[in-house]
Amino acid sequence: MLVLVIGDLHIPFRAHDLPAKFKKLLVPGKIQQIICTGNVCNTDYLHYLRTIAGDVHLVKGDYDDNPHFPSSLILNHPPLRIGVLHGHQIVPPGDTQSLAAVARAMDVDILLTGHTHRFEAFELEGRFFVNPGSATGAWHPTWPLRDPASVAALAEKAAAKAKEEAATAEKKAEKKAEDTKAKKNAKTTDTKKADDATKDNSSDSKDASKDGEENKAAEDGGDEEEAKQAPGPVPSFALLDIQGAVVVTYVYQLIDGDVKVEKIEYRKNVDSNALAQQRGAAGATATVGAAGAGYGQYGGR
């Protein structure tokens, strides 16, 4: 079964449409089910998704105003249980341990979330976690303004420069102390010459200090660099090819105008007891108890 996982479209507020290259791929007749992680923000686009596949499930994002959208879902694809949550409930956003805690509370094998606008897929505690990212590449309020790698490189460069300047200052201080000691120990017979020499040294020292400050200011002005601007979110969505206990995830990302595809496989470790129980009958619809108040509406399939 081929399942499209898509979300964080934010149309028309942060994006006008899906990328044209994505729309060419998402054609009717190939996808059996669509799971939307929220923030569609436009009812017309929900109708568009239904033209791709009639079986559409979605959860309410923090920018969706439809009160009828559920906050979470659990879908059964025996022997797999798939939980769906937008992700703004996760604190901090996208935190792996918080996601794992939610997956345990929902008792699901696969947890699908969104909100961060960044694709992620990883396995933890025998469960599989997928965030399809933003299908439109919409901006996110917490997205960094500066490239983290560039910021780190500049910080490292500044630290090295500060260390070098400290070492230079220490050497100058040592030299000054040695010169002072030498002057005190030196014997001179010409007081006037000694006084003149002291005045000259003082004048030279002031001039040198002034020149050093000017040079340092010039160096600082010339070396000023700014961190590179962080690239925006990459448009992406995921296709899950579900075959029993095996799920092959294909992530589609629009990078530099080209669609790149990455393949990730998850295999549930199913023992005989789990097969017998199957964690609930196929298509069963139920209400989760206390934990379900936060995460528990079922959409059986």
Image (spheres, helix red, strand yellow):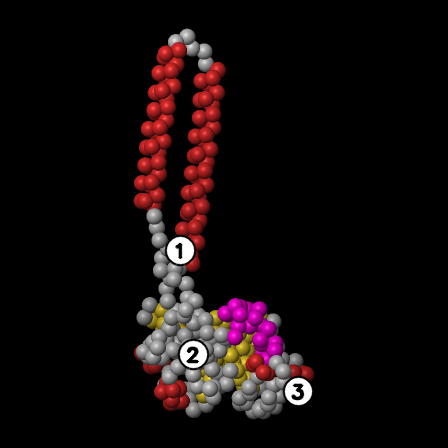
> Looking at the image, which residue is at 55% across and 72% down?
99
Residue 197 visible, this angle: yes
Question: How many discs appear?
Answer: 3
Note whether 179 is above or below 270 in the view shown.
above
> Looking at the image, which residue is at 31% across and 44% down?
222
Query: Picture quarter containing residue 118?
Result: bottom left
Which mark, residue 150?
A: 1
Secondary structure of residue under mark 3: helix
Foreground tag (2 vs 1): 2
Q: Are marks 3 and 1 in contact (CB under 8 Å)?
A: no
Three-letter code for the amino acid on which mark 3 is drawn = Ala
What residue span does the magenta drawing correspond to?
A: 89-109
Decide if residue 6 is on the left or right side of residue 103: left
**Percent of width and height locating residue 95:** 53, 68
Q: Residues within 10 Å of mark 2 (few under 14, many from 20)?
A: few
Q: Are marks 2 and 3 in contact (CB under 8 Å)?
A: no
Secondary structure of residue under mark 1: helix
Which mark, residue 276?
A: 3
Q: Is residue 184 magenta?
A: no
The residue at which mark 2 appears reads as: 63
> Looking at the image, which residue is at 36% across and 79% down?
11
**Percent of width and height locating residue 228:** 36, 57
Query: Picture quarter containing residue 142?
Result: bottom left
Marks 2 and 1, how far apart in space?
A: 32 Å
Foreground tag (2 vs 3): 2
Farthest-out residue, right: 273
Q: Residues within 10 Å of mark 1 (few under 14, many from 20)?
A: some
Note whether 124 is above or below 201 in the view shown.
below
**Mark before the other along the chain sequence, 2 or 1:** 2
